[in-house]
Image (tube, coloured by chain):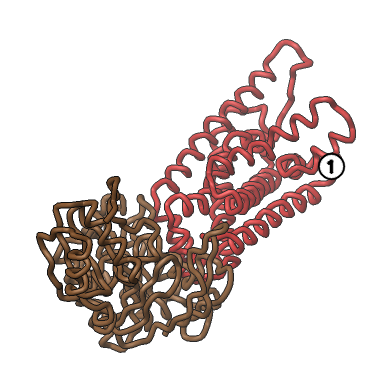
Chain colours: A red, B brown
Amino acid sequence: MTTIRAEWAKLRSVRSTWWTVVAAVVVMAATAAQVAIYVANGNTNDDPSDDAGVVPLGSVLIDSLELVQYAVLALGLLMITSEFTTGTIRTTLQCTPSRGRVLLAKAAVTATVTFGLGLLLGAVGAAVAGPVLGEWGAAPAAGTLRDVVALAGYLALIGVLALGLGAVLRSAVLTLTVLLAVLMIVPLSLREPDITALNRVADVFPGEAGRHFLAGDGQPYPPAVGLLLLAGWAAVALLAGRAALRRRDA
Amino acid sequence: MITLRTLTKRFGSTAAVDELTVDIAPGRVTGFLGPNGAGKSTTMRLILGLDRPTAGQALIGGRPYRRLRRPLHEVGALLDARAVHPARSGRAHLSAMAASNGISERRVDEVLATVGLDERAAAKPARAFSLGMGQRLGIAGALLGDPPVLMFDEPVNGLDPDGVRWIRQLARSLAAEGRTVLISSHLMSEMQQTADWLVVLGRGRLIADAPTAQVIADSGVAVRVRSPRPEGLAAVADRLTAAGAVVESAGTDELTVTGTTAERVGELAYELKVPLHELASHEASLERAFMALTADRVEYAARPARTGGASA
């Protein structure tokens, strides 16, 4: 608990944390508005095949994550990579020599903050997209709330994934590059030739698992499996991070 | 009490710390002395569990650092004063450290007062700190848990004379309270005024572990030799080195020799027909003692200049 308090104190005492939150909110508002405009415009199109019909607000929010998730990833990876660039990792490990404790505390803080941020982003996105969608949006209270909680959970898990990866790679740029590859580029490339085997492999990647979890499409696996897969990736990243912290000199 | 037992750290094929076995006792200021690259900082990092030893162990009160639950209450260390997030205020830095070890905010105020950082200075982001302020912040962090063991790595670096005097008094008063105080430095003159005991390191190996006064006394008298003939001086230097003395050159026309006497140097110069402009014995200093101790341990040891035709 003391280690968690220390990590929280470190996170909130750096201004860049708050700028990241502000950036995430702004990006979310802009993206949600844009997605909502597409939906609304699609429905006033003369071509009935373009007609999207009435779209649930929750799915607009989920579609808006594509870009804003990188601001949230930045929060997670900066929790640890900034310690290596500034040398504060030595102070941190001096205060708390147990590498596992340090990383677990960081994971708890990252998950809590990114989950909370996810709820905020959901609210902001709903406030912006709702009016834009107008008659073309459906916002059943329970369904929308479930979607917002799910997207907050998704952001918390990829935040922890970024943290674990950052502990292994130590560099923010390198970590972000690998995350971009794992979340988007590699699964997209695997899907490109549309071969079933490769599609199955792509489905296992964390970004895809998260997408299936959020979309709740049940194809090729139910949302719960997507959630478990994503959580598994986050756990593996944390374990790898702990091993790296233990073995390598700080 | 810090206990090192055959502590070894290799980076590739070079041993930064080489089978170091020594006890750092409480109640006195121990100077940890050695030229740059001797392995002082690596040893301190090994003690703090930041680096993993290749072999051997470093114990604090009988336990390895990585086993300590609330280490700030056991060891306070200033390693690298720059290891503060540049955007974080000095106070927030200390508060986070305090939180990690269950130390109160009141104690943060206390240590800030002890090191002389006022409220306004502590509220500044660390990037606005001068080197001296950074050192003070680092020392404040070391004092947070009121630990019985303190380690300062090159604490006087970048400090003005007032700061240097302050560190010296602080170290002495901490030792007088019965704490273990280990201060590393490559500045021999500084250690001479601060340390009761010296642990001297050269190329990662223990060279001396004795009271400061004894280290100085053991080094013997230094002899200064000046001659207008560089090649003649080089010949004298060669013969002295062959006889087991330690020779340093201070320019082409001057040598400082330890491990011999002025008489011996004078006779040798006469024998080699080298005219001397000066031949004098000097009071031994820690500086000199240190040079004598580490002469064969330093990779870049000064050698007398050899300017052709150095025959006797």
User: Could one spot residue A35 in this view of the protein?
Assistant: yes
Mark 1 burial class by Cα count in 10 Å: few <14, some 14-19, many 20+? few
Q: Relative to A178, is B9 on the left or the right?
A: left
Q: Relative to B61, is A118 on the left or the right?
A: right
Q: Quadrant of the C terminus of chain B?
A: bottom left
Residue depicted at 66% across the width and 38% down the height? A62
Q: Quadrant of residue B170?
A: bottom left
From the top left corner, tell me how far across and down residue B43 is, in percent.
45, 69
Secondary structure of the residue carrying tag 1 is: loop
Q: Is residue B237 positioned above or below B222 on the image? A: above
**Three-letter amino acid code of the residue under disc 1:** Gly
Disc 1 chain ID: A
Q: Nearer the viewer, residue A106 or B13?
A: B13
Residue depicted at 42% across the width and 85% down the height? B1
From the top left corner, tell me how far across and down residue A139 is, in percent.
66, 38
Q: Is residue A48 positioned above or below A206 on the image? A: above
Q: Nearer the viewer, residue B53 or B173?
A: B53
From the top left corner, tell me how far across and down residue B308 is, in percent.
29, 45
Q: Relative to B95, is A192 on the left or the right?
A: right
Q: Quadrant of residue A193?
A: top right
Residue depicted at 47% across the width and 38% down the height? A23
- Residue at the extreme left of the image, as rendered: B277
Residue bearing the label numbered 1:
A218
From the top left corner, tell me how far across and down residue B86 is, in percent.
35, 51
Q: Nearer the viewer, residue A60 or A5?
A: A5
Q: Is residue A96 positioned above or below A74 on the image? A: below
Q: Quadrant of residue A11?
A: bottom left
Q: Relative to B119, is B57 on the left or the right?
A: right
User: Could one spot residue B96 in this view of the protein?
Assistant: no
Q: Is residue A51 positioned above or below B285 on the image? A: above
- Residue at the extreme right of the image, as rendered: A196
Residue depicted at 62% across the width and 37% down the height? A65
